[in-house]
Image (spheres, rainbow, N blue to C red):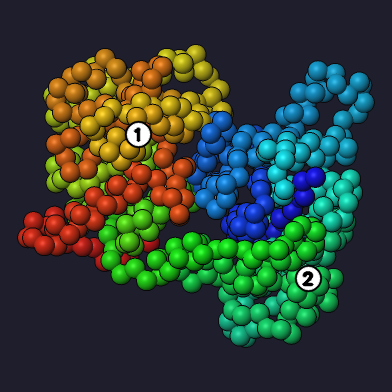
């Protein structure tokens, strides 16, 4: 029978529940167990697909086309868990299912209430999130903060869920904050005590407390927390801020013995030690690397780091694969127009990510032209590909008014147009071309050299595409369609053979990269950027001087 771990958070939001949940999953996998991962979010949106990245960060897409919380990206980067549409449920999705049943008459005239109908729907969602059904441990993260009114139905549901199973089949992990008051030089345990008190009022007794800290937690503090929160001392675990990489978290938690405590409680076999040798070698690579290259990311939502979370992580993975630290220069697309492409001077590569809306579009196009003309490695993702096509059509193929129908419905040269399957779509949520689709990569192209295979599968999230009516003209001018969907003949990859590294993809490769297995395009892009830096440093042809570190991460 599958064992269940529920991860909750208290005191404040953004404690890193997703990272900690993923780290627990990794530790259990390295013990030879199989895991599933799930996130339950208390907001009323059915999914994050219609939310602004400034509100929610990036929208993570699964193979089967679900628009989900960005924490699912952490799950996939750390574990081998199979994520599906049932790996992320929101209040909106739960209520939608209950109301649909009520309208259908499934409740036979009964009054529909939070208990039992909403909580039953949540418990059913937890069961559906166990994919496949034979996994050893199902890890479910509860979004929000204990004490929030939105989270109450989810907390009540997991309390009820635990009643239906033997005690050794359910484990509650609660993550809290030990705030450090610099004025008095003290770390305080009271918020943790109050957070656990809130949980216990609901009827949930945490089995493990993970305490986020800036400073070291003393033994006296650990004993005090154990006493007041009714948690064994060895199960009160310090999770101090990591020094240089989020990938330190599972190694740190292993040192604290978290995996052994989990296995002991769930009565799972623990004959072998948790093997993190490759993970520790990867961390040593990150820590000891001395060479750097700088990538400019020109985007619309650049002010919020989480808006492009998977892209930044994928660049870091590519850096590990190339034995180099990738330094990111965040550039607002609007600033490229206002301040000029001089703000890109000195970078080793340019990446233009996806996005929606007209704001910043011309800045992205201008930055792509700069990279093309100065032979700086370029990588465009989703809208980044579309901007590259528009830029090339205007400035090379002679189509001066080329544009996308998304923002210029009267353009005489719509090189980007609405997909045929999207023409009659009116609802915004969950209606784009979503999930994994195949792409046939042409031999002899840059893309084929990167992937080393002809047929690939990548995840998508878009409504607009390259207009096939212009493919021949663009190809004659030098822009090659190197990857095409085999059934629908949709352009998936474009590249410029005359350029050292110039590639755009309609899909989102950042969703299939991990620290131990960098995505081939990101790996090739960083390699090209590194070569560009080496060549520029060796000669006198460098484009401009390097900027100070102010906007770098």
Question: How many marks overall?
Answer: 2
Residue 457 place in picture, x, y as percent: 44, 32
Residue 23 place in picture, x, y as percent: 60, 58
Q: Mark 2 = which residue?
A: 193
* Residue located 15% across and 28% down the image: 478
Of residues 290 and 272, which is closer to you in this image?
A: 272
The image shows residue 211, relative to residue 444, as above or below, that is below
Of residues 32 and 482, which is closer to you in this image?
A: 32
* Residue located 53% across and 34% down the image: 63
* Residue located 74% across and 79% down the image: 222
Q: Mark 1 = which residue?
A: 453
Residue 348 in sight from this viewpoint? no
Drawn side of residue 40 relative to residue 72, left or right = right
Residue 135 place in picture, x, y as percent: 70, 44
Q: Decide: marks 1, 2 in contact (CB < 8 A)?
A: no
Q: Quadrant of residue 32?
A: bottom right
State which mark lies toward you, 1 or 2: 1
The image shows residue 422, relative to residue 148, as above or below, that is above
Residue 488 place in picture, x, y as percent: 40, 16
Q: Quadrant of residue 477?
A: top left
The image shows residue 150, relative to residue 410, as above or below, that is below
Residue 76 in sight from this viewpoint? yes
Q: Earlier in the sequence, mark 1 or mark 2?
A: 2
Location of the N terminus by quadrant is top right
- At numbered mark 2, what does the secondary structure look like: helix, strand or loop? helix
Q: Residue furthest left?
A: 540
Circle 1: is it few (<14), some (14-19), or many (20+) Cα within 10 Å?
few
Drawn side of residue 322 relative to residue 164, left or right = left
- At numbered mark 1, what does the secondary structure look like: helix, strand or loop? loop
Location of the C terminus by quadrant is bottom left
Alpha-carbon span between mark 1 and mark 2: 55 Å
């Amino acid at each position: 029978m599958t064992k269940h771990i529920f991860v909750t958070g208290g005191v404040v939001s953004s404690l890193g529940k997703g990272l900690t949940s993923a780290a627990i999953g990794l530790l259990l996998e390295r013990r030879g167990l199989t895991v599933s991962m799930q996130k339950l979010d208390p907001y009323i949106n059915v999914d994050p697909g219609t939310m602004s990245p400034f509100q929610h960060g990036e929208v993570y897409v699964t193979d089967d086309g679900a628009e989900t919380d960005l924490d699912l990206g952490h799950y996939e980067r750390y574990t081998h868990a199979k994520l599906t549409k049932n790996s992320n449920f929101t209040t909106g999705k739960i209520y939608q299912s209950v109301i649909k049943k009520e309208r259908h008459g499934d409740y036979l005239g009964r009054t529909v209430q939070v208990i039992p109908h909403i909580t039953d729907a949540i418990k059913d969602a937890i069961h559906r999130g166990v994919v496949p059904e034979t996994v050893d441990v199902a890890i479910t993260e509860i979004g929000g903060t204990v004490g929030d009114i939105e989270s109450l139905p989810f907390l009540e549901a997991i309390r009820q869920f635990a009643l239906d199973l033997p005690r050794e089949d359910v484990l509650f992990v609660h993550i809290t904050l030990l705030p450090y008051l610099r004025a008095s030089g003290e770390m305080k345990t009271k918020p943790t005590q109050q957070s656990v008190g809130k949980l216990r009022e609901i009827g949930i007794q945490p089995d493990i407390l993970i305490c986020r800290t800036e400073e070291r937690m003393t033994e006296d503090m650990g004993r005090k927390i154990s006493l007041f929160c009714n948690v064994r001392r060895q199960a009160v675990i310090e999770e101090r801020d990591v020094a240089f990489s989020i990938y330190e978290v599972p190694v740190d938690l292993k040192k604290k013995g978290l995996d052994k405590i989990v296995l002991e409680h769930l009565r799972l076999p623990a004959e072998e030690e948790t093997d993190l040798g490759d993970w520790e070698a990867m961390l040593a690579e990150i820590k000891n690397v001395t060479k750097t290259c700088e990538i400019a990311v020109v985007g619309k939502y650049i002010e919020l780091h989480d808006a492009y979370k998977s892209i930044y992580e994928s660049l870091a993975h590519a850096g590990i694969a190339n034995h180099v630290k990738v330094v990111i220069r965040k550039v607002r697309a609007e600033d490229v127009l206002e301040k000029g492409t001089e703000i890109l001077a000195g970078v080793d590569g340019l990446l233009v990510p996806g996005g929606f809306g007209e704001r910043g579009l011309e800045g992205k196009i201008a930055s792509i032209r700069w990279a093309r003309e100065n032979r700086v490695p370029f990588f465009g993702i989703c809208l980044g590909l579309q901007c590259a096509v528009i830029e090339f059509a205007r400035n090379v193929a002679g189509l001066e008014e080329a544009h996308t129908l998304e923002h210029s419905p009267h353009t005489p040269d719509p090189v980007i147009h609405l997909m045929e399957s999207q023409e009659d779509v009116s609802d915004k949520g969950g209606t784009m071309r979503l999930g994994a689709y195949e792409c046939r990569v042409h031999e002899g192209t840059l893309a084929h050299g990167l992937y080393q295979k002809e047929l690939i599968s990548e995840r998508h999230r878009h409504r607009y595409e390259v207009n096939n009516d212009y493919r021949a003209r663009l190809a004659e001018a030098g822009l090659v369609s190197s990857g095409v969907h085999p059934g629908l003949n949709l352009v998936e990859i474009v590249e410029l053979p005359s350029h050292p590294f110039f590639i755009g993809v309609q899909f989102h490769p950042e969703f299939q990269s991990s620290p131990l297995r960098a995505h081939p395009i990101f790996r090739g892009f960083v390699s090209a950027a590194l070569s560009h830096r080496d060549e520029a440093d060796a000669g006198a042809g460098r484009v401009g001087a390097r900027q100070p570190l102010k906007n770098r991460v």
